[in-house]
Image (cartoon, helix red, strand yellow):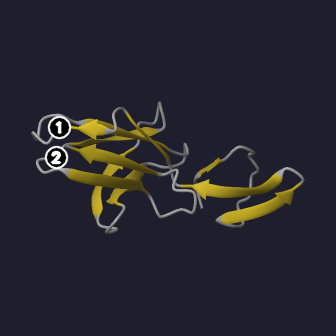
Amino acid sequence: MVGVIVLAKLRLNTEAICVECVEPEGIWTYEIMPALLSVDKYSIATDGIDAATVTAKVHPDLAEITFYHADTGEPIATVPINPATHTATLQVTATTPGTIHIRAGEPTITRLNEVVITAQ
């Protein structure tokens, strides 16, 4: 499995999707992420023109990543990875108001591979 490992404490664990470790300061969850998502703006107009750019930071070994509608699991697009930056982007527009919940790759426990955009 290829992915980005993330959380406050990093520990490489290629044998499992998620590991919980109990330490004196609390329980830490270590999870292999398919991607880390960010978005340039969390709110867009419903004019079909205003757009938010979702950026997925992925492991260098990946050549593409699939973006999904996180609520339904339906694929939106499979996007090639920029080999120089290890990122892929998705432009999001809307023509009706609502919440747009986007995920890159498979579902995860921490949901760091998801973003929520409000269309208004």
Classify residue 69 by image quadrant.
bottom left
Numbered circles on residues, count: 2
Say which of 17 and 102 sits in front: 102
**Figure quadrant of the N terminus:** bottom right
Q: Secondary structure at mark 2?
A: loop
Q: Of the numbered discs in the image, which one, if any, rests on residue 96?
A: none
Q: CA distance from mark 1 to mark 2?
A: 7 Å
| Mark 1 neighbour class, 10 Å CA radius: few under 14, some 14 to 19, many 20 or more | some
Q: Earlier in the sequence, mark 1 or mark 2?
A: 1
Residue drawn 23% across and 38% down?
44
List x then y, in percent, for residue 116.
Answer: 37, 49
Residue drawn 64% across and 47% down?
6
Classify residue 104 by image quadrant.
bottom left
Residue 109 lies left or right of residue 57; in this view the side is right
Say which of 99 and 106 sits in front: 99
Q: Secondary structure at mark 1?
A: loop
Residue identified by numbered label 2: 94
Q: Nearer the viewer, mark 1 or mark 2?
A: 1
Mark 1 in CB contact with mark 2 (< 8 angstroms)? yes
Is residue 57 placed above or below 3 in the rendered structure?
A: above
List x then y, in percent, for residue 28.
Answer: 75, 55
Q: Residue furthest right?
A: 24
Is residue 105 placed above or below 16 in the rendered structure?
A: above
Residue drawn 57% across and 57% down?
110
List x then y, in percent, for residue 97.
Answer: 17, 50
Q: Amino acid at mark 1?
A: Ala
**Figure quadrant of the C terminus:** top left
Residue 11 lies left or right of residue 108; in this view the side is right
Is residue 78 placed above or below 120 in the rendered structure?
A: below
Residue identified by numbered label 1: 45
